[in-house]
Image (tube, grey):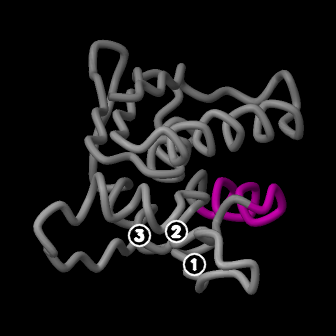
Amino acid sequence: CRTREVLALIQQAGISGAHRTSRASASGQSAPVSNGISKDEWEQIFQPAGAVSTGGQLEAELAARLLSTLALGREDLFLDLGSGAGRLCILTALLWPESVIMGVELSPGRHQQAEQTLAHLRAVLSPSYAFAPVHFLQG
């Protein structure tokens, strides 16, 4: 089953991790709150008026189960608005190699992390392993 194969692959590549948080550093500078974004950046972009956000991510196994119900083909575009570190886009690309995947992320830090995660996956994957084109946009 491709789903199990893909889950094992992303586990080996180290990109299946869940949402992580950290606190301010001892130096007083903003420490990352989530996926490499600083606390100041998080508050400025995602909590403008003191809004509360869970900022969670789907676990890889649950996301794979949900994605396996889709039937994406050559003419289909999977669009993830608020793509964060890009894990859902990458998982979709691995599960549906004939589709086109696009992730849009507001945060520059998360966008950069998505690009790095994709580059890491390409480096560890066999060149013969099929996965869909993935495009990350910041803005």
Quarter holding the C terminus is top left
Q: Which numbered circle lies on residue 94?
A: none
Q: Secondary structure at mark 2?
A: strand
The one nearer the camera, 20 or 69, is: 20
The one nearer the camera, 21 or 82, is: 21
Residue carrying label 3: 57
Kind of residue sitting beneath label 2: Ser
Dot 3, crowdedness within 10 Å: few (<14), some or many (≥20)? Answer: some
At which x and y percent is residue 51? 14, 74
Residue carrying label 1: 20
Q: Earlier in the sequence, mark 1 or mark 2?
A: 1
Q: Which numbered circle lies on residue 34?
A: 2
Kind of residue sitting beneath label 3: Gln
Kind of residue sitting beneath label 1: Arg
Identity of the residue furthest to the front in this view: 28
Q: Is residue 39 magenta?
A: no
Query: From the viewer's perspective, is 39 left or right of 29?
Result: left
Q: Secondary structure at mark 1?
A: loop
Q: Is residue 9 magenta?
A: yes
Above or below, 39 relative to 82: below
Q: Are marks 2 and 3 in contact (CB under 8 Å)?
A: no
Q: Which residues are magenta?
A: 4-14
At which x and y percent is residue 22? 60, 83
Q: Residue at x 41, y 71 (%)?
A: 58
Q: CA distance from mark 1 to mark 2?
A: 6 Å
Q: Main secondary structure of the magenta part?
A: helix
At which x and y percent is residue 4? 63, 64
Q: Are marks 1 and 2 in contact (CB under 8 Å)?
A: yes
Query: From the viewer's perspective, is 52 left or right of 19?
Result: left
Which one is closest to the eye, mark 3 or mark 1? 1
Above or below, 132 relative to 59: above
Q: CA distance from mark 3 to mark 1?
A: 10 Å
